[in-house]
Image (cartoon, coloured by chain):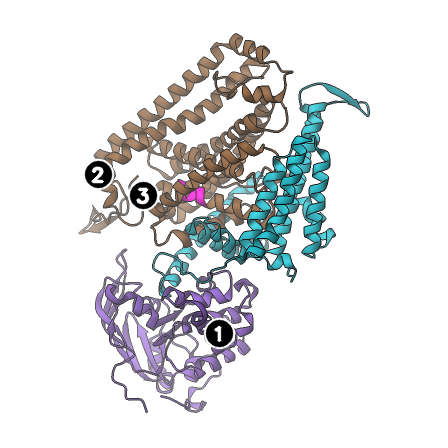
């Protein structure tokens, strides 16, 4: 039992509008404790990606605050914030921009100042966590999509983040890769926020879910409970896959 | 013009040439080609010696002759120019097989063919024994501006990605019955090119975001530093030094 | 065509290499300004990858032959001249080093000829035309067409010039020039069509991504209480004051006219002395050795081209080269003047581009 003093992530009153006038967030409030795995659900256009981009300060200029492990996201601590918040984007090709896997994974820690054998050690450890150690010297386009996804996760893990934010981690993955990724995420000792449309995946990995709809948090509770609430699901354009009954799935073991 | 021959030349191997630090190889090959280009064309024997030198390097690098010769086909366009030269050059003419050819043109053709071919062979040997990433590291080590090397690095990384997107666009076009057969179809192709530009640019913006998210602050972090020992430099520079001797002999003899 | 090793002799290759290196160094700084120094690397890299890919796109002409885009003009118009130079240079560098396409010692020549000349000539022409023509999308397309059309023979002309100074075979420069420039006018037509259509396609969807078209976007209008009102200026559309824009247009128009007059004068001078040219040609002799030709000085020294039998061709050739050079020079002068005047506004411009 860890004495949780500060929340991993605290979002308070977050509102944001794009320069063209379109307002995407209308006051978002939620808090995630250390070690939690939380899913962020919601229909397309709800503002999920906009919210995610606020978590490491890529988008700024709106109202409200974002705090990561006690550190407020803002110009003053940007480098440290970006070390603590590890975002895995949807397209691994955007994230694997170096000529080899090793350099991609090394990029984050090297940018933070690590060099030499410590850097190598960090790279090896991160690649080991995702099971991609033998692909260290390969160029990214020689890897399959699932493998690239895993390396993308490694690039972020190498920075030893406080919270891992994943944008649609299971999209475009075949069932075996999906399971491999799920195993990896379960084995990690890090707070996880997962933006996803894949409701069974959310149920499998995240005991708690938030529903973001029309730029506000519409629901916050146990994933099983939310998915079983048909009226709620329908109200926010969330639909379960054919034949899937959330009530038939046993409760997620391990940490809440 | 600029059709782009995208055949990757690297051949995996463990020869002593493969093991040399990339910046030594880049320097050696560049110096060698410079020496070749500076050699007087009349010293035909010199070019034979150069070919032998390159053959030795190929042997040391365990690059098969067939592979090397096949890659020499890339120079086909300027062979055509070389063949044309004896017909269009000025100067005294000589009769060869019933055709009146310019002596100067024949020399010019020999010059272009010999030097061009040796240049291509040297480049092929370089590219086939040095991995892409190492080539970029080598260029950076040789004091090429870091921004330029970064741009080259991204270009190489995403060249295949964008080419793939282009291929998928072509498949989509053809699946809808479009076949580009003449100039009148260029509008559609250009629209694809335009869309490809927008996608590429937007991807560049997303890559930038990904870099920011991992702590990028304007300059690429230093990940590797490769140094070369004296022995390695001597081994690499053996080629251009031998060539230099030949060149000087070519000028004086 | 990528020149191989041995085409141009060693000293000239080295000299042109130095010129190319200097131009690339300048472009590195310029690209940081065009793209924003933080984003320069990934954006330029992706654009370079785009150029690399699009050079492989087949544009069928007829019966199995197809044309290809070189992309210098396209790059300059879409991302600006400095970034354009960088991107095409990087493509050429990688092609030489990775694919043995183009000689390593000929890199200087290839970069100067295919990356620098095409982008600079195309951009200068494009901006000049766009300032003078009405502010519509069609003007952008038309300006792209002309810019790309001239850029290709201009690069051929520069290549011929380099060949005249340092070529290793004794072909009459006149013949080389007319052949090269002639063929490249045709190639330029293809390049012009493709460039214009592609720029048009981008402008139709994301006009904000076309560097050359900044300041030409439609002002955003909002309907407020039934009336159309200008949206507050976010600083992203450049030139906010119509009056200033109009007077700048006058400057540009004057500049272009002056350049054309200068070019015309140059051509007139060239063709006004056909006897002089013939005399020069016979003096130097068509049948003299290559070393003497090279030593006789630049073929442009007499504003004609030595060794061309047909005086009209010589004059015309000089005219083409002259127009190219003076357009660039003249526009360059006006650029410098404008930049100095606009220096204060440039510093406060929005990050999406400077108000050049």
Left or right: residue A143 compared with residue A205: right
- Identify the chain of the residue marked 2, using the numbered disc in the image: C
Q: Residue at x 49, y 32 (%)?
A: C149
Q: Name the foreground residue: A58 vs C224.
A: A58
Q: Please provide percent x and percent y for residue A116.
A: 44, 68
Q: Residue at x 32, y 82 (%)?
A: A34
Q: Quadrant of the N terminus of chain B?
A: top right
Examine the rendered structure and indicate whether residue C3 appears above or below residue B171: above
The answer to whether residue C192 of the structure is visible from this angle is no
Mark 2, secondary structure of its residue: loop
Residue beneath disc 1: A124
Do the residues under discs 1 and 3 have CB atoms within 8 angstroms? Answer: no
Examine the rendered structure and indicate whether residue A198 appears above or below residue A142: below
* Distance Cα–Cα, label 1 vs label 2: 58 Å
Left or right: residue B107 compared with residue A146: right
Q: Please provide percent x and percent y for residue B21.
A: 55, 57
Q: Which chain is cyan?
A: B
Q: Quadrant of the C terminus of chain B?
A: top right
Work out whether disc 1 and disc 2 sit on a shared chain. Answer: no
Instruction: Place residue B163 in its image quadrant.
Output: bottom right
Q: Which chain is brown?
A: C
Tag shown at residue C269: none
Q: Residue furthest right?
A: B97
Chain A pictured colour: purple
Left or right: residue C334 compared with residue B77: left
Residue beneath disc 3: C217
- Identify the chain of the residue marked 1, using the numbered disc in the image: A
Residues drawn in magenta: C81-86
* Distance Cα–Cα, label 3 vs label 2: 13 Å
Dominant secondary-structure state across the stretch colored magenta: helix
């Amino acid at each position: 039992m860890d004495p949780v003093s500060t929340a991993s992530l605290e979002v308070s009153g977050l509102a944001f509008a794009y320069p063209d006038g379109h307002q995407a967030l209308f006051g978002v409030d939620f808090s995630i404790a250390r070690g939690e795995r939380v899913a962020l659900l919601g229909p397309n256009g709800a503002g999920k990606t906009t919210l995610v981009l606020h978590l490491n300060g890529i988008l700024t200029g709106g109202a409200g605050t974002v705090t990561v492990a006690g550190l407020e996201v803002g110009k003053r601590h940007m480098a440290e914030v970006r070390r603590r918040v590890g975002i895995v984007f949807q397209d691994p090709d955007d994230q694997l921009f170096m000529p080899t896997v090793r350099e991609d994974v090394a990029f984050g820690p090297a940018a933070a100042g690590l060099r030499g054998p410590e850097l190598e050690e960090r790279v090896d450890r991160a690649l080991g966590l995702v099971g991609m150690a033998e692909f260290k010297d390969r160029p990214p386009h020689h890897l399959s999509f699932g493998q690239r996804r895993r390396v993308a996760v490694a690039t972020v893990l190498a920075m030893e983040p406080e919270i891992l934010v994943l944008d649609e981690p299971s999209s475009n993955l075949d069932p075996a890769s999906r399971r491999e990724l799920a195993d990896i995420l379960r084995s990690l000792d890090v707070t996880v926020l997962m933006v996803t449309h894949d409701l069974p995946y959310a149920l499998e990995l995240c005991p708690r879910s938030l529903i973001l709809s029309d730029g506000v948090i519409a629901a916050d509770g146990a994933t099983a409970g939310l998915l079983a609430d048909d009226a709620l699901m329908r109200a926010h354009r969330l639909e379960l896959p054919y034949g899937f009954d959330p009530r038939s799935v046993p409760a997620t073991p391990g940490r809440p | 013009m600029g059709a782009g021959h995208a055949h990757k030349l690297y051949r995996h191997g463990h020869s002593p040439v493969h093991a040399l630090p990339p910046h030594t190889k880049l320097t050696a090959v560049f110096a060698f080609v410079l020496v070749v280009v500076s050699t007087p064309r009349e010293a035909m024997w010199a070019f034979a010696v150069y070919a032998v030198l390159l053959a030795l390097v190929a042997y040391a690098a365990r690059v098969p002759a067939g592979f090397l010769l096949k890659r020499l086909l890339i120079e086909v366009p300027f062979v055509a120019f070389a063949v044309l030269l004896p017909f269009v050059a000025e100067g005294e003419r000589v009769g060869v097989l019933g055709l009146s050819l310019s002596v100067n043109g024949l020399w010019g053709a020999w010059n272009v063919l010999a030097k061009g071919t040796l240049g291509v062979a040297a480049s092929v040997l370089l590219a086939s024994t040095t991995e892409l990433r190492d080539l970029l590291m080598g260029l950076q080590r040789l004091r090429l501006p870091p921004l330029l090397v970064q741009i080259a690095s991204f270009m190489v990384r995403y060249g295949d990605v964008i080419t793939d997107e282009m291929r998928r666009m072509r498949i989509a076009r053809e699946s809808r019955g479009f076949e580009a057969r003449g100039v009148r179809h260029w509008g559609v192709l250009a629209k694809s090119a335009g869309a490809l530009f927008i996608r590429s640019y937007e991807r560049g913006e997303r890559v930038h975001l990904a870099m920011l998210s991992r702590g990028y602050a304007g300059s690429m972090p230093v990940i590797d530093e490769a140094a070369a020992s004296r022995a390695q430099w001597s081994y690499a520079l053996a080629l251009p030094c031998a060539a230099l001797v030949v060149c000087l002999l070519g000028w004086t003899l | 065509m990528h020149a191989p090793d041995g085409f141009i002799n060693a000293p000239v290759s080295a000299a042109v290499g130095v010129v190319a290196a200097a131009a690339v160094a300048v472009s590195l700084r310029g690209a940081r300004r065009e793209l924003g120094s933080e984003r320069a690397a990934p954006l330029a890299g992706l654009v370079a990858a785009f150029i690399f890919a699009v050079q492989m796109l087949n544009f069928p002409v007829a019966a199995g032959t197809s044309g290809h885009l070189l992309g210098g003009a396209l790059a300059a118009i879409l991302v600006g001249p400095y970034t354009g130079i960088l991107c095409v240079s990087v493509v050429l560098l990688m092609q030489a080093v990775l694919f043995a396409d183009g000689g390593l010692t000929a890199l200087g020549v290839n970069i100067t000829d295919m990356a620098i000349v095409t982008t600079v000539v195309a951009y200068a022409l494009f901006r000049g035309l766009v300032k003078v023509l009405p502010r519509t999308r069609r003007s952008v397309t038309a300006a792209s067409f002309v810019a790309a059309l001239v850029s290709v023979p201009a690069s051929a002309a520069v290549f011929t010039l380099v060949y005249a100074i340092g070529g290793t075979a004794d072909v009459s420069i006149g013949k080389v020039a007319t052949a090269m420039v002639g063929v490249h006018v045709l190639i330029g037509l293809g390049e012009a069509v493709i460039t214009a259509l592609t720029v048009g396609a981008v402008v139709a969807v994301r006009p904000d991504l076309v560097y050359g078209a900044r300041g030409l976007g439609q002002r955003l209008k909002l309907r407020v209480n039934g009336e159309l009102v200008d949206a507050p200026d976010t600083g992203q559309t450049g030139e906010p004051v119509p009056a200033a824009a109009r007077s700048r247009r006058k400057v540009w128009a004057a500049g272009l006219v002056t350049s054309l007059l200068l070019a015309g004068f140059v051509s007139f001078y060239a063709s006004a002395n056909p006897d002089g040219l013939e005399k020069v040609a016979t003096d130097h002799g068509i049948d003299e050795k290559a070393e003497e030709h090279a030593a006789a000085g630049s073929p442009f020294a007499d504003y004609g081209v030595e060794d061309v039998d047909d005086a009209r061709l010589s004059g015309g050739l000089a005219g083409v080269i002259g127009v190219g050079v003076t357009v660039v020079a003249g526009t360059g002068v006006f650029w410098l003047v404008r930049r100095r005047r606009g220096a204060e506004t440039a510093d406060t411009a929005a990050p999406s581009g400077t108000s050049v």
